[in-house]
Amino acid sequence: MFSDENLFNKLALTSEERISTSDPGSSLTCKGQGTVKINIKNESLTLHNFLYVPNITNNLVSLLDLCSKSITIIKNGMTFQLPNDEQVLLKGQIVNKLMTVNFNQPRTLLSKISTNYMWHERLRHPENQELKSLPLKLLNETLCDVCVKGKMTHFPFKIHFSRTNEPSDCLHMNLSDQPQVIATFNYNRQAYFLQDHLLLEKPV
């Protein structure tokens, strides 16, 4: 008897039938019968005429069915093995006079809940308002360094120059090592580079 419909390779649904249990006050419902294919490592095991019982707690396999498949069962105390050539197909324990095998798949490890900052990076740095329209569990808003730097501009010149009254009173230029005349203005002034100072002077 198996409870998972997905384990059946072929399943024929039938009218519901009641199955008696050891508890006189309860019973199980059988909804079909079919073929089950179990993949164990590199081997596959096909079992025929198995009942589909959705409410059963544990899947039950008959030992006679296993022995009819030329499978050897080795018992050692309260444990048992199903060997095949040089490898062991199954290992299990004997609990309440039943041979039990745990077929549960290991749970996938889940990462921590992503914050809105991580989703902000994954979605190419959208505005926070756009993130709020998504079905996400958003935490406190945080600043994105990339967005902040992308919106930055060059700093303006330091405010240490007073407003000028005439043209050429204040010039912003690159500095040069050697003094040289770079411009002559209509106001009879020449501009020189002297180390890190810009000098404007009138010719004598």
Image (tube, rainbow, N blue to C red):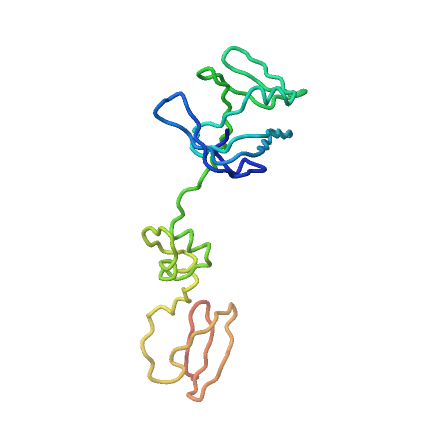
Residue farthest along the bottom direction in this orientation: 186
- With 89 as the anchor, is 116 left or right in this view? left
Q: In this rendering, is residue 203 above or below 15?
A: below
Q: In this rendering, is residue 181 above or below 104?
A: below
Residue found 52% across the figure and 20% down from its top: 92
Could you say which is closer to the camera, residue 54 or residue 24? 24
In the picture, the quarter occupied by the C terminus is bottom left
User: What is the x, y in percent for residue 157?
Assistant: 38, 69
User: What is the x, y in percent for residue 183?
Assistant: 49, 81
Residue found 56% across the figure and 13% down from its top: 75
> How many numbered marks have been drawn onto this rendered protein structure?
0
Residue found 57% across the figure and 23% down from its top: 90
- With 104 as the anchor, is 143 left or right in this view? left
- With 33 as the anchor, is 150 left or right in this view? left
User: What is the x, y in percent for residue 47?
Assistant: 59, 29
| Location of residue 85 (image quadrant) | top right
Could you say which is closer to the camera, residue 7 or residue 171? 7
| Location of residue 158 (image quadrant) | bottom left
Q: In this rendering, is residue 147 above or below 100?
A: below
Could you say which is closer to the camera, residue 57 or residue 84? 57
| Location of residue 143 (image quadrant) | bottom left
Residue found 46% across the figure and 54% down from its top: 122
- With 72 as the anchor, is 142 left or right in this view? left
Residue farthest along the top direction in this orientation: 77
Could you say which is closer to the camera, residue 40 or residue 111? 40
User: What is the x, y in percent for residue 54?
Assistant: 45, 34
